[in-house]
Image: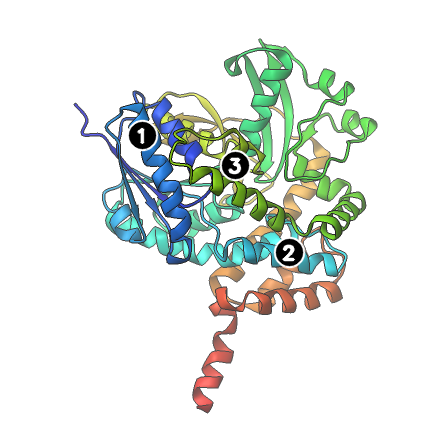
Amino acid sequence: MSKGLKVAVIGGGSSYTPELVEGFIRYYHDLPIRELWLVDIEEGLHKLNIVGELAKRMVKASGLPITIHLTTNRREAIKDADYVSTQMRVGMLEVRSVDERIPLQYGVIGQETTGPGGMMKALRTIPVLLEICRDIEELAPQAWLLNFTNPAGMVTEAIHKYSKVRSIGLCNAPIGLIKWLTAHYQVEADRIYAEFVGLNHLHWVTRIDVDGQPKLTELLEQREQYAAANVPQQGWDADFLLSLQALPSYYLKYFYMTPQMLQDQLLSFENEGSRAQVVQQVEQELFQLYRDPELKEKPKQLEQRGGAYYSEAAVNLMRSLHNGTGDIQTLNVPNRGTIDFLPHDACIEVNCIVTQNGPLPIQLSTVPEPIKGLMHAVKTYEQLTIQAAMTGDRQVALQAMVHHPLVPSIAIAKDMLDEMLEANRAYLPLFFQKENIAVAETI
């Protein structure tokens, strides 16, 4: 009889955690968790306590023998863990608001995971995730790290390049699309096959089969589209979709419809503030609900958060790794030749067969010619950003910023980079090291 599993969740005070706990309860017989450790930093302790108490009530109501631990001691939580899940936000929502606001002042898309905002998030996050990886290497070397800390593709790629940890990146967009298709066609998910090609937040669906019958062209002709709560609702051009013969991720609207999306963002910012401020309001309402001592289940309002189904994706992946189910999931994994025009060590988002030894990418049936250039350009920006995060090299950071397709000029890139780095000074010590040394020497 198995002694049961130990799972550590880094960023356990997240508003998403009740969905994760719901999944662990629902699939306990496939994934027998003995200990669930929810970890957060001191600044997030009040959220951790609220979420943690709800999690305890949920487990108690289920009658399952899962012990929940709340802690700020990351190493204690990681020690001997079977799975470590990361859902953290370095700098919390306050810094996200800065990431979104500053680009808009320069007439550039202000978004938390793509463009300049996504770059800053990666620069803050990658060094911290790699510190966590050092703990895993020492204290739980056989653990799987399931990363859905954004920007998930860049973060996962950095983990593969700079640590020995077994890691897989996750996003809610693929599982969200599958759920939308099951509702649209009124079938179970196992009767649908959708082929995803691309990078995290930059993927295209190039094939959709229902019961073995191709449905992609039909969906494109009907201009049916899956959208998300955190992306403005601009419609796709029908001629464009039909000529592309692929269904772009809703994040691709930032690239294909930049002027319209920028106007939407500017209008929203004027009326509602940044997306981060909207999310803060949603979170305040959620945590008010979570405080209710009578609440013993995940509230429906959680789906208003932009990352609905993140946690479901994480539970599905843990179940499949634990049981070696061989089912197909869309994951962020090293390329290793799957997409032949991208670097071998690039992280890509594609369908994989999940085994106990990890995910095996499935050979792609088609990669439309028009999508290759954008994919390559964004991957170049991502790899430069990872290099900048590891070195604190402003020259590399400038090249990353200039070569992001959403940044229109060198002049804007230079000024915006300087302002955003300064705004993130507290979280980017590598970029200010020489300056700090000079001050110390003067003193």
Type of amino acid at the residue the image marks with label 2: Pro
Residue at horizontal 35 percent and vertical 28 percent from the top:
24
Q: Residue 12, can we see it? A: no
Residue at horizontal 66 percent and vertical 48 percent from the top:
377
Residue at horizontal 25 percent and vertical 50 percent from the top:
76
Give the structural element (helix, strand or loop) at label 3: loop
Which of 251 and 245 lies nearest the eye of the viewer? 251
Residue 116: mark in rendering: 2
User: What is the distance, in whole Å, between disc 1 and disc 2 at their CAs?
Assistant: 41 Å
- Is residue 407 toward the left or the right of residue 345 in the image? right
Which of 43 and 80 lies nearest the eye of the viewer? 43
Give the structural element (helix, strand or loop) at label 2: helix
Q: Is residue 72 above or below residue 53?
A: below
Place of residue 84 in the rendered image (x, y in percent of width and height, measured from the top left): 34, 41
- In the picture of the structure, the residue carrying the numbered disc 1 is 59
Place of residue 193 in the rendered image (x, y in percent of width and height, measured from the top left): 56, 18
Type of amino acid at the residue the image marks with label 1: Val
- In the picture of the structure, the residue carrying the numbered disc 3 is 171
> Looking at this rendering, what residue extends furthest in the bottom direction?
442
